[in-house]
Amino acid sequence: MLTTKEAIEKRRSIRKYKQDGIPDEIISQLIEAAGLAPSGCNAQPWRFKIVRDAETKFKLAEAAFKQKFIAEAPVVIICCADVKGYIEGTVSGVQDLGRIGVVEDRVVKILLDRVEEMKTMNIEQLGARISLNVAIAVEHIVLRALDFGLGTCWIRLFDEKKVKSLLDLDENVYVVSLLPLGYPDEEPPAKKRLGLEDILLS
């Protein structure tokens, strides 16, 4: 099994996949890894839909502006945010934090005031705010997938309305990313990265 450092260094965006199937048990372990991610006030807003059907994958590729490799992956994980669940989970999480004394009463009030503000937002505004929580969970999947020799590719370029309509997703669900998943049929080289001196602010 890879160390975390090795997994981070080995990860690549994979756009060519073998057609070997992926066992349900492995998919379950990937989703379990996602569920261990941190989230604001422990709201855990991530929701996932597993797509294996060839016709649905083809339509997802079309909704992603004809990125054909999406349809060619054995599995596509639809990574979503549950907006209603996020609000409810945040309230519960804030109350728990206050009850056990992790945060002061004034901080609890600030957080609950923010929840009230969120209730006035539309799903696009809320979805964008919640996406950070889901992104952390998705990266857990991306890195855990390497333990099974699987590759992935983050996809943010898609028509969200088309994806939601295709998958008949609830109005309270915001699609954060598509994540093709499969055994790699390519070995992309590492891309040039900025050095420490470039990413550390003085």
Image: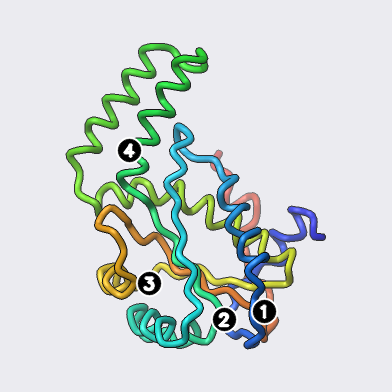
Tell me which numbered mark, 3 or 4, is placed earlier along the sequence: 4
Tell me the CA gap for discs 1 and 4. Answer: 37 Å
Is 102 above or below relative to 76? Answer: above
Q: Disc 3 designates what residue?
A: 157
Q: In this view, does 6 lie above or below 179?
A: above
Disc 4: CA contacts within 10 A as few (<14), some (14-19) or many (>=20):
many
Closest to the observer: 202 or 161?
161
Which circle, 1 or 3, is nearer the viewer?
1
Q: Tell me the distance, in whole angstroms, between the alpha carbons under discs 1 and 3.
A: 22 Å
Q: Distance between the residues labelled 3 and 4?
A: 26 Å
Query: Residue 108: x, y in percent?
Result: 37, 19
Separation (CA) of disc 1 from disc 2: 8 Å
Amino acid type, mark 4: Ile
Q: Earlier in the sequence, mark 4 or mark 2?
A: 2
Q: Which amino acid does label 3 sit on?
A: Leu
Q: Which amino acid does label 1 sit on?
A: Tyr
Q: Can you identify the residue that label 4 sits on?
A: 87
Q: Earlier in the sequence, mark 2 or mark 3?
A: 2
- Residue 190, image quadrant: bottom right
* Residue placed under numbered mark 2 in the picture: 74
Disc 2 packing (10 Å; few <14; some 14–19; many ≥20): many
The amino acid type found where label 2 is placed reads: Pro
Mark closest to the chain's N terminus, 1 or 4: 4
